[in-house]
Image (spheres, rainbow, N blue to C red):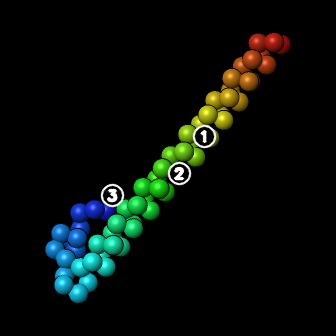
């Protein structure tokens, strides 16, 4: 996560809040993107596993 930057710890009077907002947006965006990437990887893994089980079942029948 991108929480601990020097900009956030020591905010400047004029730009401090803008930087804090930007860091918060980046970290939230990163959180949702990483969550989505993990979900996609997990789903593809499950699909592959289903295919493998199907292939094994078909081989047993023959």
Residue located 54% across and 45% down the image = 39
If you read the primary sequence from the N terminus, does the residue marked by circle 2 or circle 1 appear first?
2
Q: Quadrant of residue 51?
A: top right
What label does residue 43 carry, if any?
Answer: 1
What label does residue 11 carry, if any?
Answer: none
Residue 57 in the image: x percent, y percent? 75, 17
Q: Which residue is mark 2?
A: 36
In-front residue for pair 55/31: 31
Give neighbour class at mark 2: few <14, some 14-19, many 20+ (Cα, 10 Å): few
Residue 10 in the image: x percent, y percent? 16, 74
Give neighbour class at mark 1: few <14, some 14-19, many 20+ (Cα, 10 Å): few
Per the image, label 1 sits on a secondary structure element best described as helix
If you read the primary sequence from the N terminus, does the residue marked by circle 3 or circle 2 appear first?
3
Q: Are marks 3 and 1 in contact (CB under 8 Å)?
A: no
Residue located 60% across and 40% down the image = 43
Position above or below: 22 against 1:
below
Q: Which residue is mark 3?
A: 1
Identify the residue at the far bottom of this view: 14
């Amino acid at each position: 996560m991108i929480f601990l930057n020097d900009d956030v710890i020591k905010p400047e009077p004029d730009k401090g809040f803008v930087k804090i907002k930007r860091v918060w947006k980046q970290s939230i965006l990163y959180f949702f993107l990483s969550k989505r990437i993990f979900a996609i990887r997990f789903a593809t893994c499950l699909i592959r596993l289903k295919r493998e089980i199907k292939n094994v079942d078909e081989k047993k029948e023959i």
